[in-house]
Image: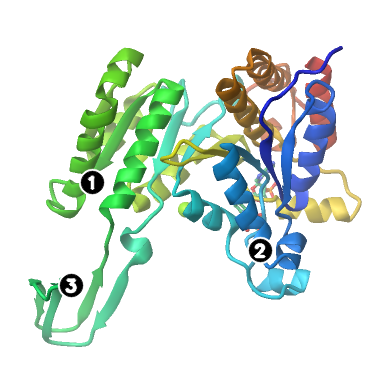
Amino acid sequence: MTKIQMKTPLVEMDGDEMTRIIWQLIKNKLLDPFIDLKTEYYDLGLANRDATDDQVTVDAADATRRLGVAVKCATITPNAARVEEYGLKQMWKSPNGTIRAMLDGTVFRAPILVKGIRPVVRNWEQPITIARHAYGDIYKNVEIIVPGAGKVELVYTGEDGTEIRELVHEYQGPGVAQGVHNLDASITSFAHSCFRYALDTKQDLWFSTKDTISKKYDHRFKDIFSEVYEADYADAFVQAGITYFYTLIDDAVARVMKAKGGFIWACKNYDGDVMSDMVSSAFGSLAMMTSVLVSPAGVYEYEAAHGTVQRHYYKHLAGEKTSTNSVATIFAWTGALRKRGELDELEDLVAFADRLERATLDTIESGQMTGDLARITTLSSPETLSTEGFIEAVAARL
Ligand code: NAP
Ligand code: MG
């Protein structure tokens, strides 16, 4: 069999623990036999991030800007326990945070739907993709404890000395106050990423804030989205047969619960944090959630939404059999290969991505799956496979 050829390499970011093992299995059993795989490899495993003083993460993000499409394995975000476990020089920052900051991207999270794993919300038939703004609001807040009677004010001082002053509250007794901010540039990037991704995936885009209450702050988000849409995307949306729809966050929640799915829901930072956990749990499994970072410049980085599955890795190290779900990591690869195929006009590569996804879903729908899905499936007598066994079953079907 002649292998499928690639033109431009993918940026490949290897990672940690159980997902690092899955990464190698996917390459050996599902990709290498069929594709003459071209990648620029960056080892983001914690040991190598430490050895390179995290330069490897910066290099990988630079390569993504240069080549346009990346696929990333889950990585450890160090905490105090990890610093000790790996003897780290310092508590390196989250690689995802570093990459997101460098690419100025928005993360889109979408569930992978499969027959036999029913969403908790009965009428959800298609995925709901959450787009979460990744800058500002309460994540960059400044807070004070107000000790007693007195006033809190919001003061802006321009470079030329002009001042805007607003009274927040005249306190009669103790309380709390906080200041939050956002930037037109960041909101504009967020809007571009959302409109672009909606066009890419041919799905309607919903955006919600609380602009009836927050008449300046949230209203600014609404206005910027509307301006960006009218200036750059309105015609393309009409041509693609999709719509942009703005509504209040509480109205959006009510509509989402009654909807069939099949759309993107763009959320402010905090709303996206909360809603993405709600939507992903209601769809069934963290192991079936994909994630793609899309930059306003049109650069894509695909990964699984879950972490390195540390608990399973320790079982693996202890010589026990594991049953870790590789679906989201497989779909990170297919997402990246499909996008690379589209950009380079390689029909074979796009078709391969489709077939690998189909083989993965067919394997599950035929009753062969990992333990996490076997526990929640509506199929009768599912066969629980090991980590490796599941990937081999997909390979056999492929
Ligand atoms: P996790 O790796 O997402 O796993 C949490 C639990 O969810 C697992 O123990 C397992 O439950 C279940 N699970 C997640 N993915 C699964 C899969 N593919 N197959 C089967 N079950 C799965 O989160 P964590 O254990 O809290 O974090 C581990 C490390 O991942 C941390 O160091 C964290 O920094 C990192 N992390 C990285 C990313 C990223 O790179 N994007 C994201 C999140 C976390 P059971 O144990 O009940 O089977
Ligand atoms: Mg959260």
* Crowding near the residue tagged with mark 2, few <14, some 14–19, many ≥20 C-alpha atoms within 10 Å: some
Numbered tag placed on residue 54 in the rendering? 2
Of the image marks 2 and 1, the number of the one nearer the N terminus: 2
Of the image marks 3 and 2, the number of the one nearer the N terminus: 2
Numbered tag placed on residue 13 in the rendering? none
* Crowding near the residue tagged with mark 3, few <14, some 14–19, many ≥20 C-alpha atoms within 10 Å: few
| In the image, residue 271 above or below residue 115 | below
> In the structure shown, which secondary structural element does the residue marked by tag 1 occupy?
helix
**Residue highlighted by disc 1:** 221
Q: Tell me the amino acid under the disc marked 2.
A: Asp
Task: For the N terminus, give its image quadrant.
Answer: top right
Separation of disc 2 and disc 1 at Cα? 34 Å
Task: Look at the numbered disc 3 and say if its residue's Cβ is closer than 8 Å to ligand 2.
Answer: no
Separation of disc 3 and disc 2 at Cα? 36 Å
- Please report the residue visible at 64 percent of the width from the left and 50 percent of the height from the top: 60
- Please report the residue visible at 30 percent of the width from the left and 73 percent of the height from the top: 142
> Is residue 200 at all visible to an observer of this figure?
yes
Of the image marks 3 and 1, the number of the one nearer the N terminus: 3
**Residue highlighted by disc 3:** 159
Question: Taking 334 as reference, is 281 left or right?
Answer: left
